[in-house]
Image (spheres, rainbow, N blue to C red):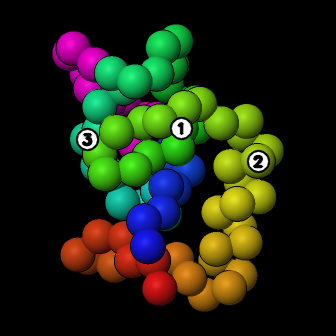
Amino acid sequence: MCLAIPAQVVELRDGDNAVVDLAGVRKEISLSLVEGVAVGDYVIVHVGFALNKLDPEEAEQTLKLFAEMGQLTADGDGLTLH
């Protein structure tokens, strides 16, 4: 099963690239599929691509639910979804 996860944009880079933060894990992704993304926005990320922008309240609620279920953890190797 594949899952797209909300992540917050923390840095815009050259071209269509950005850095996102999810539970302390930072990853460079492509914004080539989404227009008008700014630092602070939440995007849905799947296999290194932002698929669309997400309302901040909805993103926070989704991340909170993952954390409450014990399904989302961050460690030195990255983000793990159980």
Q: Quadrant of residue 52?
A: top right
Task: Give the camera-side residue of 63 and 10.
Answer: 63
Q: Are marks 2 and 3 in contact (CB under 8 Å)?
A: no
Alpha-carbon span between mark 1 and mark 2: 11 Å
Residue 61, relative to residue 41: is it above or below?
below
Q: CA distance from mark 2 to mark 3?
A: 22 Å
Give residue 28's mark: 3
Q: Which mark is residue 43?
A: 1
Residue 8 image point, x, y percent: 52, 42
Answer with mark 1 or mark 3, whichever residue precedes in sequence.
Answer: 3
Q: Which residues are magenta?
A: 9-21
Task: Please tell me the numbered disc located at residue 58.
Answer: 2
Is residue 17 inside the magenta stretch? yes
Q: Are marks 1 and 2 in contact (CB under 8 Å)?
A: no
Of all residues shown, which one is farthest toward the front? 1
Dot 3: element:
strand
Q: Name the residue type under label 3.
A: Glu
In the image, what residue type sits under mark 1?
Val
Query: Quarter-wise, where is residue 16 in the image?
Result: top left
**Residue 4 appears in the picture as rendered:** yes
